[in-house]
Structure formats: C-alpha cells, structure tokens
Amino acid sequence: MESRLLRVDLTTGELKSEVIPHSIFERWIGGSGINNWIMWEHFLTHDINCDPRGPDNIFVFGVGPLAGTGAGSGIKGRITFKSPCYNMFGDSAGGGKFPYMLRFTAFEYIAITGKSPKPVYLRICNNEVSLEDASHLWGKDTLQTHTMLREELGTYPSKVHTLSISQAGENQVGIASVVSDALRIHARCGGGAVMGSKNLKAIAVQGNGGLPIAMPDEMLAWSDDFRQKIDSNEAVYGFKRRGTLGAVEMYQHIGSHFWRNNQGNMFRGGEITSDNWVNKYHKYSEVCSSDCFIACDAKYKIDGTESEAAKKYIGESFRRPEYLTTGSAAGALDVRDWAEVAHWGKITNDYGIDNQDLSCAISFLMELKQRKLISDQDVAELFGHEQSLEWGNMDDIEACLHSIVFQKDLFGKLFGDGPYLGAIRYSELKGQNFMKYATYGKGGASFTEEMRPFPTWMNNMAVASRGADHLKGIGLIEKFQRKDLSKIYFDGRTEAADLTVPTLKGASTALIENQVALLNSYGVCLFHWMLDPSGYTPQDYYGKAYAAATGIDRTPDELMLDGARICNLEKAFNSRIGMRREHDTVCERWMWEPTEEGMYPGSVAADMFNPVLDEYYEWRGWDKESGLQTRKSLEACGLDDVAEVLAQEGSLAK
Amino acid sequence: MITVHAKFHSHFKELASADEDSFLIEIPTVSEFAKCICDKYGARMRAMLIDPKTDELNERGTMFVNEKGMRVSAEDILEDGETITFLVGIAGG
Ligand code: SF4
C-alpha cells in the first residue's frame, strides 16, 4: 500500500507531490490516522501554540483505504487542523462524493500550509494540480461556489466535486464549516475558518483513474458478504426509510432531546414530536457517497401545503434533516414546524456553519432573555436593532445566523467561536457571570442531545480530543442498554449497559474511541457499524476488508492497538498545548442541574463523573491526577517518539 | 392470562400500521409477548423483532423498554397491564 500526498504552500504557491510509504499505513492505517500524523509532524517544526487562523496552521484532507473500493461501507473524508474555535486538536468527517473522487485522482491526502496573497481555489485533475484565481467565487455561499465551479470546469475527465467554504469561512468565523459538494458538511471544529484564513475558497477535483486493491477477489467476497448481511437486517431498512430521524420518537419517549438550551429534554408541539413527517416529505432515498449499501440520505421538496410556515419555503429542496439538525432546531431553539426545521438544515449547510455550535449559542442568549437576565436594550446593543429573541422565532434565528456569518454586529463577533467562548466574552462585557447557562464540554459546544442520565456520554463530552463530541467515543452500549455488547467487550460483565452504576463507563469510552478511530481511518461511514456493532466489528470484520484493500493483514488485537495509537496521538497534541485533567470537564448545567423530565429525572453528571473519568484514565494507562499520558502507556502502543517529545516539553506524566 | 400493551414507534409503527396494540398472553414473558406480535404482524415484524441466528430478541438497531425506560430481555417477566415500547436504536447525524 502506497499513496500520494499533495503538499500545498499557499504563501509561495509551491505544489509538491510526495509518496506516503507503506510503513506509514502500517503505523497509522489511513484516513484520520494519517491526517493526524501529518499534522503532528508539521507541528514538530512549527509553533503548536500558533494562532489557528495564522499561516502556521495546517489544513489536511485525507480519505481512507476502504473508501471507493466498492466495499459498500460508505465513504467519509476527513479534515484535520488546529481548531480556531476551541483552540485544540480539530477534525471533522464528511460524506458526499468529493472524497470518493479524490481517490480517482493521483492523490488521497492534501496538506495545505501558509496563506495565499489573494483568494484561490486548488484544482486537482488526475495528476495535474494548480492554484486558480477565486476572486469571482469570494462572497458566494457553498451552493453558489459548487455550481459555478461545475459550470467552469466541465465534465471531462469526470464531473467536478468540490470542498468549499461560504462567507462564514471567508470571514474566519470560528464555527465555520467546510462543505462537500454543497450537500455534506464537515461541521465541527471550524475547518472553514482555517481555509478562509488561508484565502483558500475551495478545492475542486476531477479524476478517472483507478484504485489499487491488494487482493481484489477477497475484496469482492467481503463486499458480497457485507451486502447480504445488510440486506437481511430489517432494522437497516427502517434506517433507510428514516435515517437518523428515527431517533426523534425514541428520544421523545425516554427524554433525550435538548430542549430550550437543555432546560428540558422533550420536544413540544404536535407533529414535531414524531417522525411521521418522513412519509409526508420523503421523495426518495439515496446514497450520500457513492459506495454505500444503506442509502439513508433522502431529499425533500416543500410545496407549501405542509403547514402555515411552509408557505415561506415553497419549492425549497434539500436533504432530509438529520437528527442533530432536528435536535438543534426543534430542540435547542424550540422550532415547532418541520418545514422550518428543514429550512434550518438547508441554510446552515449553504452558509457552512456548524448548527450544533450555532444553536447552542443562540439558545444560550434566548435563555438569558427568557430569564430576564438581559433586557430589550441589551439585545438591541448586540444586534444593532430590536429583536424579540423568542423561542422558535425563525426570523430571529435567521438574523442570528446572518450576524455570525457576516460578522456584522456585536453578537456575531462575540459568538463566532461558539457558545463557550461567546458566554465568557459576554459575561466579561456585562460584568455578570452567565456561564451556568452555557452548554459545553471541554470548551466544545454540546451536541444537541440530553446526556445527563448517561454517564458514558458525559465522559465522552469531557475527554473527546476535539471538545464535547458524540462521534469519538459514542456511548451506544449504555444509551441503548446493550447488555449483549457489554458482555462481548467486558468478559461477560453487563455493567457497561447499566445506566445506574459508574462501572465500565470510562472503559467503554476508551474501547469505543479505539474502534471509532479505526473506522475513521478506514474512511467509512459509522452508521453501518452502529446498526450492528457486534457483527461488523472494526477490528475483526472490517479488518478483513482493510487487509483485502491494502494487503496489511492484522489480528484484531493489533488493530485495536492501532486504534489506541491514533487516539493517543490526538491526546498528545492537546497535552502539548497545555491541556490537563482540569480541562476534561463539562458545563455547570450538566454537572449540577438535575433533569426534570423524561424517563430519568433527577440525573446530574456529578453523580458519577469523577469515578468514570478515573476509570477512563486507568483504561488508557494515563496518570489520574494530571490526566497526562505516561511513558509506559505511549510505549505500549509504539509511540516512544511521541513520549520523547512530550517529555522534552514537560507534558508527560512524571 | 395477562394483558400487555405495545407502543410502536418509527419503523415498528410502519410495520404494524398502528401506534399501539394490546395482547392477551398466557406465558408472562417478553419472548412470548414478542412471539404474539410477530404472529399478528407477519414476517417483516419477525425480522425486526427476532434475530434469526439466535431466535432471541433482535438487539441490532432496536430498543425495547419498559415503563421505567429500562431495556427488556427475552426472559423478563411481564405484569398484567404493563406497556412495552418498541423503538429503533439509532443516534447522531
Ligand atoms: S449510511 Fe447514510 S450517511 Fe452513511 S454513507 Fe450511507 S447514505 Fe451516507
């Protein structure tokens, strides 16, 4: 297995092709593992404490070795950088056809440094690469940018696929995202701001090369088996019909939504509490990424008859909202009309903004207004004009979005880095402590689900390398109370599935982080695995596909160690910038304010937080007091060189 | 004989074409209850509820909870008048 990395220095305009040798795949698997390593090496020669919006930051795109192979496991590309909104390790996955198409050019990884003197886009057409003027694209949203590049670049040797930013990225808004083909968003951590800070508007790829597969017969056999397994699971058909929207009714039943800035955990309103909307709007299912046996994506088109509010959006068509788009609108902001929820999904995508960060920032402010902690005059000071800031008011919500995207007034400037820094800045400005109304973990914005009854989730929020996060540790054993999984992972023990005890919760986080790191490094979608985590084990079942694609045949134990190595490198990055145990924490609301509704009332994170965190460090082999890695734990996963760097900088446990 | 109520959500609701139903069952266990539901609603409901490999409740992509929000297992004993809710187990997005 070999691959090619395109290095782009935007300051000098130099474009350089490098081989990524087999040994790097042996150590880092691919995808996010290799991205992490490219970034780690970069910051051995550049100041890791640099301004993330400065030329010293790096922006890496990579796609793993299973992507585009016909494996049927979906394709996710990954961007990796130092996060401008959280000022720590940052990365984000995204689907769409961009990552797939990149594999059909001469490159699978791109590392971008420096800053261009003027707006440019990077063009990759098979093995030809160039930096092109993007002044005509500057000021356009992601849909406009994608459409213009498609028209400009034609259809030979293939259709154009793009990765682009909107005005939010251009304005270096901390929570600006990067959007693939104007449809699928790399939302988290502010990659859009990093691209914007480099004057990089887009990357456009076209390719018609082939993919090397080490063992094609084995790959085909694996793929056949996978398709049969997927097709014989009726739950997959249900997922195809609803996608993640299937979670709406489950969360409504157990009380796991994030309502009004997490003051509650159930949606209010009629139709919004069910997923019947799917049948009303569902046009057809499709795959988001060219190589997926599930196809959970779908389109809606609003004809104006669906509701009173729908009349505003006649003709609007976009992807059916995912659960978290719904959770942020119907939950965090209490929007009660499905057409408005769908519209929220479209505008946050077109403007390339993370709707989790954005909704938490807006709902924080709405709660201050609701509690009369701020006056109409305070609101007018933030926006330059009066606004009701009533829950669910879409006009107000859109005004907040514009304020952030275009950085045109005080609200946008204060909250452009999300709710945590926004709340700190606003508290300082007003001379009052509003932090108890901000929802976050480790400085990262919450994802819009109720998590207080779920100790593994709370641990995920505190320890995830990129701030509060649902896609690194994924507390599925506990949330779905999967005793069967707990038994498989923990020698017949069932406590990992038991919400009422702290035991095995930190262990679950560590174990699943390692598994997810593998999936992210293979370059596949997580949903297939989530639908049958014991059937499609990343270290065993997927491991065979990885071997077929790359020729790298590992035992499940070796692959789990590979996953641990990838997680440890992310941790080491954060240790180098000074993060310690005290940073592995969650907001006051989650820690101390009990849930008042749902199936699990009276839950607070504090009940189990410290024992779970201790157990997580124990399972990782890290020092419980400082939260730092030990030399032994790093050497155990083959990171002696990383331990040396940390020791030199005083970031290794004593 | 006891009466046990079922609440169906998401894909279960579609398979049953109903939001809820009630069943009279002789043996008061979750597995017997699941069998009654499968008998009434047919092959696709069976495919969703029962794992063909183990003949046990299908844990993959599903979530069956009692009134306290606790997941039930095949061997759990049910009480007269109890409600079990059938949900899909998916998150994120
Ligand atoms: S399961 Fe859904 S999100 Fe994942 S690759 Fe397939 S269509 Fe895309």
Image (tube, rainbow, N blue to C red):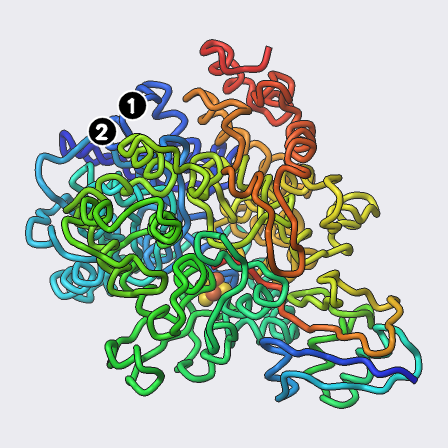
Quarter holding residue A391: bottom left
| Relative height, residue A496 to residue A335 (above, below) | above
Side of A211 relative to A509 (left or right): left
Provide residue A155's location: percent of width, then percent of height. 20, 66
Chain containing mark 2:
A
Identity of the residue drawn at 61% across and 27% down: A637
For label 2, the residue is A54
For the question of whether residue B69 can be seen, the reply is: yes
Q: Is residue A291 visible?
A: no
Residue under label 1, please give it. A50
Q: Is mark 2 within 8 Å of ligand 1?
A: no
Residue A265 pos. (x, y %): 54, 58
Tell me, yes or no, whether the two marked residues, 1 and 2, touch with CB atoms within 8 Å: yes
**Alpha carbon of mark 1 to alpha carbon of mark 2: how far?**
7 Å
Whether marks 1 and 2 lie on the same chain: yes
Q: Which sits in the foreground, A484 or A643? A: A484
Q: In the picture shown, does residue A583 fall above or below A512?
A: above
- Kind of residue sitting beneath label 1: Cys
Element type at mark 2: loop
Residue type of the residue flagged with mark 2: Gly
Q: Residue at x 55, y 53 (%)?
A: A450
